Amino acid sequence: MGNMATQTQFHVLAVDDSLIDRKLIERLLKTSSYQVTAVDSGSKALEFLGLNGENEDEERNSSVESVSAADEDHQVGVNLIITDYCMPGMTGYDLLRKIKQSSSFKDIPVVIMSSENIPSRINRCLEDGAEEFFLKPVKLSDVNKLRPHLMKGITTKTEMQSNSNKRKGSEEIQSPDRTRPRYNELEVV
Amino acid sequence: MDLAALKTQLKNFVQSMFEEGVLDNQFSQIQALQDSTNPNFVEEVITLFCNDAERIINEINRNLGYQNVDFSNLDSYVHQLKGSSSSIGANRLKLACANLRQASDERNKEGCLQALQLITCEYCLLRRKFQALLHLERSIVELETNQK
């Protein structure tokens, strides 16, 4: 994590269009001693990361600087992104895809939250790179599951970059608390 | 009333809300997030919730007032209200939202109006109880502050 040597806290970027849910997730994350930035849309999240649009090599214009966390080496100190699935405009899934397609940010773990227990949705998110899928309302026990993903981030940055085996749907050994069992129970609404 | 008695009263009041199904365990999660570094967390969340819920209920009302109801717009509002209700632990209100969701899915305007009535009822009940809860909370804080 090169330039992050001085950073002592993990920094989580939380994305949710609901004001209440943003407040809750922020509190949950802060309780777990994470630094939190909460935004209300996928596009604001991308803006914060410094991904302006189609081309991440674009010159970042001055209107973005006020929300960008980029330091002079264009590295944003975000260690994990947790996003709601259902948002107007860009969904959490769209955001996930954009992050995973970005050469700068594809290694940032992404967690998806949703109020709806739809197995096909959950599977798709996990297959496309999400580390975890939390059903709302998110609890402290869910937030506790984030730490292994954050710790992993420290080691992979200093080792090799590609981690391509992760997304093949096989059971992971390093994350014993995976939420996979969750979507076998169909929640009656 | 002394501090211990007030705290017991608050605890019993919240417990009764659980028993009536007005609140569920999610509310306990929210209470657990309040501590000395965030002493007003419960009040802040309740305030945010009530403002949001009222805004949404008004919007739903307005939407249903049109001759041609925009049901997809309505869906979006119901989803928001259901989400907020779930996040704060407002169990009965959340269930009332499911009714409206169903009527909206069926494009049943009359059903929607009825479901909205139920939502409004549940919300008013909840708000009254939340107000009583916050009153107790504030009395407790005041006593605790005075005792320092």
Image: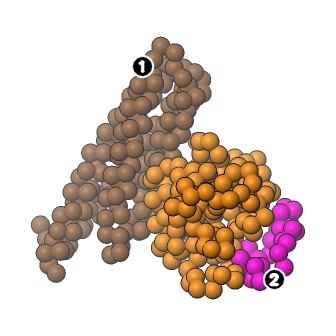
Chain colours: A orange, B brown
Q: Quadrant of the C terminus of chain A?
A: top right
Residue carrying label 2: A159
Q: Name the residue under label 1.
A: B65
Front residue of this view, candidates B39 and A164: A164
Residue A101 shown left or right of residue A10 in the figure: right
* Residue A125 in sight here: no
Mark 2 belongs to chain: A
Identify which residue, A80 or B53, lies in the foreground: A80
- The dot on residue B108 is none
**Under tag 2, what secondary structure?**
loop
Relative horizontal placement of residue B19, taking residue B111 as reference (left or right): left
Say what amino acid the circle numbered 1 marks. Answer: Gly
Decide: is A100 above or below A159. above
Q: For mark 1, name the chain.
A: B
Magenta span: A152-177
Looking at the rendered structure, the secondary structure element under dot 1 is helix
Furthest-bottom residue in view?
A5
Residue A103 x %, y %: 78, 64
